[in-house]
Image (cartoon, coloured by chain):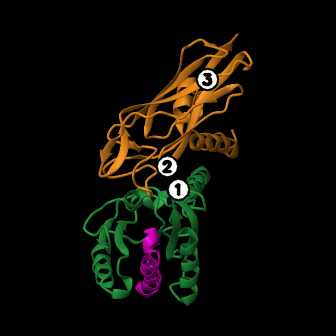
């Protein structure tokens, strides 16, 4: 084989190596669970969003329950953190035609250095009513969050994330 | 030999790309991130507390110094000190971070501690940070000699304006004062 012909495969191998040295995550398909996890900021380790009752009928009322697991040692701020310079957590229900969402209800906060915060697993409840005029069919209930995770020494930058759960509205 | 030369060229190119990638500075709308410099003066003196984590959503300025002259930095820091008085009600805060190497760290610390005593720089945070700290790349600071300083004006953790090689002269001070005014409205 001519010398230059031997060089080409070696070059290709080098280029291949450089490309393969990129993020491993980009080289394989992600599972739904992994994709769901990637949408959350680092200070929220997991979330579970459910609806009660599980069967929704037109004209009925229910609750959207959003359970957020805050990273160990970290906290997120209460919607009324008690300091105007802190990042109050904002929760905005996603609009669904024919469904009226109420004001989100938070558990009682704890106080850390004068700020009202939530640690551990935080369950936010959003009451809702399905109007009698609502169209039967599939929908996604959920909420948009804007929050910041901090601990004694550091903070993540504030971040937005969305949680949803598929629901079915029946006659 | 030819092959070795080509491989070396490719590897060299990859290395150059890796160094050149960061350093453009945070752009408007990007988030500042937590870091823990050694504070020598100012509200966090004697600690390694995270400046943006401490002052949270308040309007703030961070000046990253990469070999700039103390005279130029003093002009910038003086503007911060003055703004801290002007915008006291808005709780505006300013920090100057001097990048160091293990070789020059002690000398820079001494010089900064001395400079911080000047009345015209009162209240401004002065800190040092190793140039190889992760925060340097997180803040996209170009540590090439051509970059003397990078200035971030921000609020709610989001960069409102940034400057590279800002002058400490009257023109630079006016530019910085205007940017500070915009985040303290």
Which chain has been coloured green in this picture? B
Which residue in the protein does label 2 denote? A158
Mark 1: secondary structure: loop
Q: Tell me, yes or no, whether the two marked residues, 1 and 2, touch with CB atoms within 8 Å.
A: yes
Between B164 and A2, which is closer to the camera in this rendering?
Answer: B164
Picture coordinates of residue B159, whole percent (x, y): 55, 62
Decide whether residue B68 is among the magenta residues.
Answer: yes
Closest to the camera, between mark 1 and mark 2, is 2
Please state the chain letter of the residue tagged with numbered disc 2 in the rendered image: A
Q: Say the numbered circle drawn on residue A129.
A: 3
Q: Tell me, yes or no, whether the two marked residues, 3 and 2, touch with CB atoms within 8 Å.
A: no
Q: Work out whether B125 lies above or below B74.
A: above
Closest to the camera, between mark 3 and mark 1, is 3
Residue pictured at 34% horizontal, 87% vertical: B119
Please state the chain letter of the residue tagged with numbered disc 1 in the rendered image: B
Please state the chain letter of the residue tagged with numbered disc 3 in the rendered image: A
The quadrant where residue A143 appears: top right
> What's the magenta region?
B63-91
Give the crowd class for mark 1: few <14, some 14-19, many >=20 residues within 10 Å. Answer: many
The quadrant where residue B179 appears: bottom right
Q: Say the numbered circle drawn on residue B31.
A: 1
Q: Work out whether A99 lies above or below B6.
A: above
Decide whether residue A41 is among the magenta residues.
Answer: no
Q: CA distance from mark 3 to mark 1?
A: 38 Å
Q: CA distance from mark 1 to mark 2?
A: 8 Å
Q: Colour of chain A?
A: orange
Residue pictured at 58% horizontal, 87% vertical: B171
């Amino acid at each position: 084989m001519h010398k230059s012909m031997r060089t080409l495969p070696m070059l290709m191998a080098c280029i291949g190596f450089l490309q393969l040295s990129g993020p491993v995550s980009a080289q394989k398909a992600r599972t739904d669970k992994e994709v769901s996890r990637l949408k959350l900021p680092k200070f929220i380790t997991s979330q579970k969003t459910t609806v009660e009752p599980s069967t929704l009928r037109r004209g009925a009322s229910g609750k959207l329950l959003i359970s957020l697991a805050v990273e160990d040692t970290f906290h997120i701020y209460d919607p009324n953190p008690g300091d105007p310079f802190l990042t109050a957590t904002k929760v905005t229900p996603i609009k669904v035609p024919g469904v009226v969402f109420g004001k989100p209800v938070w558990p009682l906060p704890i106080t850390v250095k004068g700020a009202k915060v939530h640690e551990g697993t935080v369950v936010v409840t959003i009451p809702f009513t399905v109007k009698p005029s609502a169209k039967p069919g599939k929908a996604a209930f959920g909420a948009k969050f804007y929050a910041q995770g901090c601990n004694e020494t550091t903070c993540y930058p504030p971040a937005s994330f969305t949680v949803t759960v598929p629901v079915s509205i029946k006659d | 030999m030819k092959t070795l030369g080509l491989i070396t060229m490719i590897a060299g190119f990859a290395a150059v790309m890796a160094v050149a990638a960061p350093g453009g500075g945070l752009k408007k709308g990007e988030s500042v991130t937590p870091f823990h410099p050694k504070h020598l003066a100012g509200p966090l003196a004697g600690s390694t507390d995270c400046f943006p984590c401490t002052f949270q959503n308040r309007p703030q300025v961070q000046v990253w110094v990469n070999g700039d002259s103390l005279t130029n930095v003093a002009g910038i820091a003086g503007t911060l000190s003055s703004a801290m008085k002007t915008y006291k009600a808005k709780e505006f805060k300013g920090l100057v971070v001097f990048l160091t190497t293990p070789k020059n760290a002690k000398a820079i610390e001494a010089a900064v501690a001395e400079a911080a005593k000047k009345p015209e720089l009162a209240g401004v945070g002065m800190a040092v940070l190793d140039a190889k700290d992760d925060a340097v790349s997180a803040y996209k600071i170009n540590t090439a000699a051509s970059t003397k300083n990078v200035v971030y004006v921000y609020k709610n953790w989001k960069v409102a304006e940034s400057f590279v090689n800002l002058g400490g002269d009257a023109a630079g001070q006016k530019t910085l004062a205007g940017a500070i005014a915009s985040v303290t409205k």
